[in-house]
Every structure is written in C-alpha cells, then in structure tokens.
Image (tube, grey):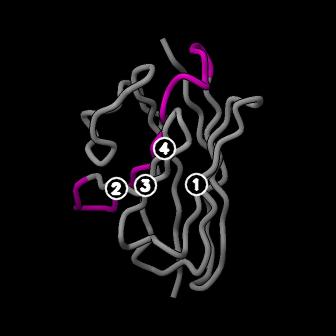
Amino acid sequence: QVQLVESGGGLVQAGGSLRLSCAASGRTFSSFSMGWFRQAPGKEREFVAAITWSGYIYYADFVKGRFTIARDNAKNTVYLQMARLKPEDTAVYYCAVTAPYYSGSYYISNGYDYWGQGTQVTVSS
C-alpha cells in the first residue's frame, strides 16, 4: 500500500507560479516512477509530467518550458514547479506512482498503481 499526499495548490493570477509537492510513504521511493496528472471540470484526466525511477523526464506538450518535475528520494517527495501559469491550467492536480521499475507508458493513467487525493490549482485571468 502506498499513500500519496499532495500539497501546494491554490489560487494564483495568470503569469504566476506555484510549486506542488507529493509526499509518498509505504514503498521504497527510489524504485518507482512518479507522475502528475490533472483534471479540469468536465474534462478527462490528462497527463502533465512524469519522472522515472531512473531519472528520465517526460512532459505534456502544453507544459513544456513552463513546468518542471523533480524528485527528492531522500524526502520521498516529487515536485511540480509551475511557472507562467495560464487560466487553462486550472484543474485538480493529482500525483500518482507506478509499480517498481515500471517500463511501460507514462502518459496513460493505467500505468499508475496509486493516486493522491488531488490538489486544486486555480489560475485567474
């Protein structure tokens, strides 16, 4: 069993920044990959970014150059630094964890075993 707790969401003006954190417990953190997804009202959950157990990083096209994912294995935490936020970034952001040493696609939600409860990000225009 893995527990994931997100934090750092909130209300920010367009052009502003936020840093989301996701603290994990219950599994050897360094052996699994972490992802961030988001879901806006009335829309499907979509991939945002992922960082693998081996350090590879993947981003959705719509966040490249604006968002940065990073992990701190010593703190069992993954971060999503978001800059130049836009109103269309408004959504509930979820972190998720894969199985250990996962090697499938990081872009689909089915690749992840456990999910956090989500944190709301609202970007005002």
Q: Is residue 114 above or below residue 83?
A: above
Residue ID for mark 2:
39
Residue ID for mark 3:
58
Residue 99: quadrant of the picture: top left
| Residue 100 screen position, x and y as percent | 45, 19
Amino acid at dot 4 = Gly
| Residue 39 screen position, x and y as percent | 34, 55
Amino acid at dot 1 = Ile
Mark 2 and mark 1: Cα distance apart in space: 18 Å
Mark 2 and mark 4: Cα distance apart in space: 9 Å
Q: Are marks 4 and 3 in contact (CB under 8 Å)?
A: no
Q: Earlier in the sequence, mark 4 or mark 3?
A: 3
The residue stretch that appears in magenta = 25-44
Q: Which of marks 2 and 4 is nearer the N terminus?
A: 2
Mark 4 and mark 3: Cα distance apart in space: 20 Å
Near mark 2 (Cα within 10 A), the count class, few <14, some 14-19 or many ≥20, is some
